[in-house]
Image (tube, rainbow, N blue to C red):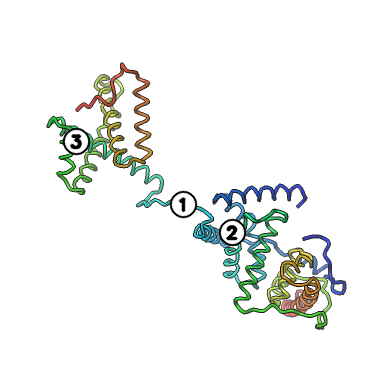
């Protein structure tokens, strides 16, 4: 590509022809799907990494966030139910096992849904109360909610060891306990109903 | 483009290419969007306006370019290197389709109209599209893309003299076609 074109001397372009050649476009709009097809081809050939896709029913990242939030709430409810039953029987581990084994998956999932909803509703009710309402009871309820949240995060970590949100919740609660110092009531030690 | 701008662009192409070699998809997309519009139009013209074939050639060109990227020595521009690959892919496609590139000898004589003073670019585009494959390739590379005969000879595996001869006949055929358009459309 140079200005020194070695024209055949007997066949020069006329100025009009040269202008027409120069006026021709050098680029064209690409078909919109061509880029994706090309990237897909390179992925198949192993030149580009294939992204990991997560199956979602709807909603993308927002849907995933809500799913995780729902799962946490549901697990909180399962755990709370297990604790309640455990306290009643005086045998926490045995009660949890009994709870799990006494129901099929559909029933367990249904219970998770219903009790999780109730837990979230209870927290919403608490947060909607005026700030001056029985501060002692309010703080106690908040501590209980935090304790259940931590326990639920731990249970989620058992269910899904790689879940980053559960790990983050546990780290946050541990950090919170550390900052409050040994005098503060342990968020893990108070389970209050 | 001046030398500095070319150097900056070249350096950027090289940086992107190094990222592509590491599997960086975003870098590939940048390179693709930078060079594909020109590559696409070149192969579209080489293939006589067959859009689906041109898209296949662009894809195949990027595949080959990515495969060979680690062997590219950056002595030429990335765009020129990519165009050369695209040219070969397009010619291979035409060969598979059984379209032989016409070769003319120095002794071949054809009569043609004289150079024209006024040419409509749209007519010119149509005239190029209607040329026999061999003519079209040399005319595009020389008169549109600006390659010298030595470069064309190297890319097409022919002699420089054959390239000149092809161009001579290609221009005559182009003028003959333009004459037809001029009569039909009264551009001249």
Marks 1 and 2, how far apart at CA: 20 Å
Hey, which quadrant is residue A119 in on the image? top left
Image point (78%, 74%), residue name: B162
**Counting other residues with Cα less than 10 Å from the Cα at mark 2, is it few (<14), some (14-19), or many (20 or more)?**
some
The numbered mark, 3 or 1, whose residue comes first in the sequence reads 1
Check chain identity for marks 3 and 1: say if they share one: yes
User: Quick one: which residue is furthest to the top in this view?
Assistant: A183
Chain bearing mark 1: A
Horizontal side of B178 relative to A130 (left or right) equals: right
User: Quick one: which residue is furthest to the left in this view?
Assistant: A89
Marks 3 and 1, how far apart at CA: 39 Å
Q: Taking A186 as reference, is A102 above or below it?
A: below
Label placed on residue B67: 2
Image point (57%, 61%), residue name: B63
Secondary element type, mark 2 = helix
In the picture, the quarter occupied by the C terminus of chain B is: bottom right
Expressed as whole percent of the image width and height from the top left, the position of residue B30 reads: 60, 51
> Mark 3 highlights which residue?
A82
Label placed on residue A183: none
> Mark 1 highlights which residue?
A51
Q: Nearer the viewer, mark 3 or mark 2?
A: 2
Secondary element type, mark 3 = helix
Hey, which quadrant is residue A18 in on the image? bottom right
Expressed as whole percent of the image width and height from the top left, the position of residue A87 reads: 15, 30
Chain bearing mark 2: B
Check chain identity for marks 1 and 2: say if they share one: no
Q: Is A121 in front, or is A90?
A: A90
Expressed as whole percent of the image width and height from the top left, the position of residue A159 reads: 29, 41
Chain bearing mark 3: A
């Amino acid at each position: 590509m140079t200005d020194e074109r070695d024209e055949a001397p007997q066949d020069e372009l006329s100025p009009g022809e040269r202008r027409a050649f120069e006026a021709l476009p050098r680029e064209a709009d690409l078909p919109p799907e061509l880029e994706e097809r090309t990237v897909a081809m390179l992925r198949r050939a192993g030149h580009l990494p294939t992204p990991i896709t997560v199956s979602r029913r709807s909603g993308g990242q927002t849907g995933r966030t809500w799913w995780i939030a729902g799962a946490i709430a549901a697990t909180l409810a399962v755990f709370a139910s297990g604790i309640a039953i455990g306290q009643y029987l005086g045998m926490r581990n045995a009660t949890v096992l009994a709870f799990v084994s006494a129901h099929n998956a559909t029933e367990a999932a249904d219970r998770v849904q219903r009790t999780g909803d109730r837990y979230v509703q209870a927290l919403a009710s608490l947060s909607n109360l005026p700030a001056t309402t029985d501060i002692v009871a309010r703080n106690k309820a908040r501590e209980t909610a935090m304790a259940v949240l931590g326990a639920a995060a731990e249970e989620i970590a058992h269910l899904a060891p790689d879940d980053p949100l559960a790990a983050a919740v546990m780290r946050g609660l541990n950090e919170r306990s550390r900052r409050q110092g040994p005098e503060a009531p342990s968020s893990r030690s108070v389970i209050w109903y | 483009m001046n030398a500095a701008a070319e150097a900056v662009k070249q350096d950027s192409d090289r940086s992107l290419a190094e990222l592509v070699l590491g599997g960086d998809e975003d870098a590939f997309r940048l390179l693709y969007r930078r060079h594909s519009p020109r590559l696409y139009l070149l192969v579209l013209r080489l293939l006589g306006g067959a859009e689906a074939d041109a898209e296949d050639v662009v894809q195949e060109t990027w595949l080959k370019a990515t495969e060979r990227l680690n062997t590219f020595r950056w002595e030429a521009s990335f765009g020129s290197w990519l165009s050369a690959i695209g040219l070969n892919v397009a010619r291979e496609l035409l060969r598979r389709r059984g379209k032989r590139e016409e070769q003319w000898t120095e002794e071949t004589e054809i009569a043609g109209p004289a150079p024209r003073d006024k040419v409509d670019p749209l007519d010119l585009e149509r005239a190029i599209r209607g040329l026999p494959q061999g003519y079209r390739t040399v005319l595009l590379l020389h008169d549109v893309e600006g390659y010298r005969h030595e470069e064309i000879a190297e890319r097409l595996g022919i002699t420089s003299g054959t390239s000149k001869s092809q161009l001579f006949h290609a221009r005559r055929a182009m003028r003959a076609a333009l004459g037809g358009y001029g009569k039909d459309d009264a551009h001249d």
